[in-house]
Amino acid sequence: MAQRIGKTVVLDSKPRIIGNAAVVGKKEGEGPLGSEFDEIYEDTTMGEDSWEKAESLYLKTAVAKALEKAAVGASEVDAICSGDLLNQCTGSTFGLRDFLSPFCGVYGACSTMALSLCVSSLMIESGGFNCCVAATSSHFCSAEKQFRKPLEYGGQRPPSAQWTVTGSGAAVLKKCTSDISPYIDKLHMGTIQDYGITDSNNMGAAMAPAAKKTIADFLTDTAAKPSDFDLILTGDLGSVGSELLYELLLRENGIDISTVHKDCGLMIYDREKQDVHSGGSGCGCSGSVLCSHIINSMRVGKYKNILFIATGALMSPVSSLQGQTIPGIAHLVNIKKGV
Amino acid sequence: MAQRIGKTVVLDSKPRIIGNAAVVGKKEGEGPLGSEFDEIYEDTTMGEDSWEKAESLYLKTAVAKALEKAAVGASEVDAICSGDLLNQCTGSTFGLRDFLSPFCGVYGACSTMALSLCVSSLMIESGGFNCCVAATSSHFCSAEKQFRKPLEYGGQRPPSAQWTVTGSGAAVLKKCTSDISPYIDKLHMGTIQDYGITDSNNMGAAMAPAAKKTIADFLTDTAAKPSDFDLILTGDLGSVGSELLYELLLRENGIDISTVHKDCGLMIYDREKQDVHSGGSGCGCSGSVLCSHIINSMRVGKYKNILFIATGALMSPVSSLQGQTIPGIAHLVNIKKGV
């Protein structure tokens, strides 16, 4: 049974990530992590006649590959937790329809990979679920169309803007003592933080306060310090958001994470060569980086104790047009490697 | 610790619904359940300058009232699980921002009240959460604008169409043995069912197969029959979907639920007088009916053992325009009254 310390939940079941997979598009495949992905699709439509259908196919492929690598059949899956950025989360619906597993739709914007891991872990911790899949996806073209401007418009992007990752990540979680895969040790669900940011081309700034709050609260709850971890990994703060996170944590909490921090949005592209401005973003950014490079590195023992904090900007184009601010949220999972 | 039987989860913690509230708009207040709601707002904008902002305010009010009735402060809430029909679930984001409780965004279209109850219950069952709030909302005007046509267009509605409820329901769940409030005994998360329906003016037909699957699977798992329950309550199948559900269950499973079945969409309006065609719909439909009339009736012992099955149509306007079908999903909670 889990224990609660402050807002942090210490799991007893220690769900293991027995399978993980990430599939991405051409641009992501050309980045520094290219060799780590399970599949790279040069044609980002994947042969589909819409970007939305393509996004669903990325998700479907990632989940299928993760299950294959875990040697788990779809009929053994007790629930799939997934969500995405598309209106009414249709990326997940149509991507997961064929698995016939119980489906738990979650929504956390770009924090979704951490949220789906939290909910999956709690399901397993409850005792009512043995095996769950946590997944998410995003697609540059469906996101631009929905949130910003039609691609054909060719709009200029300010330096603070980020590039939505085309890709999907999936992790298969199971309670099993005979396995030595990385496991979820603790989790911390975030609270909505609103610092009044209104610029949807500066998502990093909108999300950094949420990351700051979740990290600071977690460290306080567990009496831990940044150097206790091999890696503190944020989802998609990009360069602007990461700098802001360092500043906020240092100024308000006296915490310096800069030496152990990385951001998936800064890892997935080569910013010198790939013209992505402040870095990668989207649910698929942290999803694909975590479910490839990071978990693979943990499997071989490169990292033994990491914090994964994915952040989300809880806005819609309509809320922004109506003058609303952009509230942020950050969910955290503490993943460990060891017996 | 929970036990799993088939896809059904039998909870050990028996989370109690220690507070519940529903707030609705003018039309809902004029319906047969008018006297049961906590608040009825004659001005469905609630003084806000957009329908979306109004929807958030309905949700905020319902959650605040439920907490007040439960005598629980917002700081005692370990998580709020909520979602809605608006793009990127902004009804929930902006409605819940001020509570500063950990926020778990869920998306199940009109099944969201059952989904948020399932996730909240599993959180409590895990041991890591003591008190959670399950909530949802919908608004006729924001839903019509987003999913169908601008209200000013004055389009004709076919007889199979349903009327999105303006309202919100919230339930406060807590593990406590000293209370005699109704409790969540079992839950069953649904699988996506797609019978190839494409008419977004016939959501009942799209969702009925999912309700059929979940109800039949639950009864099989638990070796129960419809007459074991005081009430089998669906969310918003309306008259078309309810008839279809009876037919599917009888033909494919030999199960007759017609004598113990009610549908929130058929209860909330007087269809003779209120011109809602096939009945009410929207997350707020089952949310407001469950969190007023139904739970209140359980408190006084009118019902002692009910199944609540909320169904969702997992589509978006974009998916329909792209020729996709409308997959349905149905999540179930078995609520009981007793010590």
Image: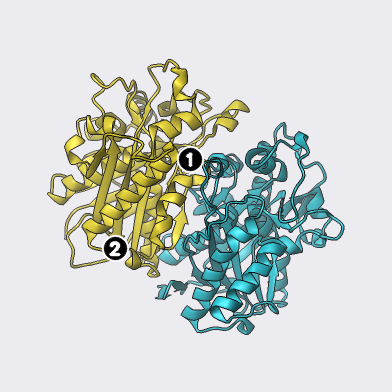
Chain colours: A cyan, B yellow
Instruction: Return the disc, 1 or 2, that comes first in the chain's sequence.
Output: 1
Query: Label 2 is placed on what type of residue?
Result: Lys
Q: Secondary structure at mark 2?
A: strand
Left/right placement of residue B48 relative to residue A102 reads left
Query: Whole-Å distance between the Cαs marked 1 and 2?
Result: 28 Å
Q: Chain of mark 1?
A: B
Q: Chain of mark 2?
A: B
**Residue at position x 38%, y 17% in the image:** B159
Figure label count: 2
The quadrant the N terminus of chain B occupies is bottom left
In the figure, B294 relative to B177: above or below? above
> Dividing the picture into quarters, in which one does residue A261 lie?
bottom right
Residue shown at the point (35%, 40%) measured from the top left: B47
The residue under label 1 is which amino acid type?
A: Leu
Q: Position of residue B86 (x, y in %)?
A: 48, 40
Instruction: Please tell me how crowded label 1 is: few (under 14), some (14-19), or many (20+) other residues with Cα within 10 Å.
Output: many
Quarter of the picture holding the C terminus of chain B: bottom left
Farthest residue toward the right? A273
x, y percent for residue A120: 50, 60
The image position of residue B177, as x and y in percent, is 21, 67
Residue pictured at 48% horizontal, 30% vertical: B145
Q: In this figure, which residue is indicated by the disc labeled 1? A: B86
| Residue in front for this viewpoint, A27 or A15 | A27
Query: Which residue is disc 2 drawn over?
Result: B174
Q: Nearer the viewer, mark 1 or mark 2?
A: 1
Q: Position of residue B226 (x, y in %)?
A: 26, 39
Q: Quadrant of residue A4?
A: bottom left
Check whether the beta carbons of the residues at disc 1 and disc 2 lie within 8 A of each other: no
Task: Judge left or right: residue A169 versus residue B197.
Answer: right
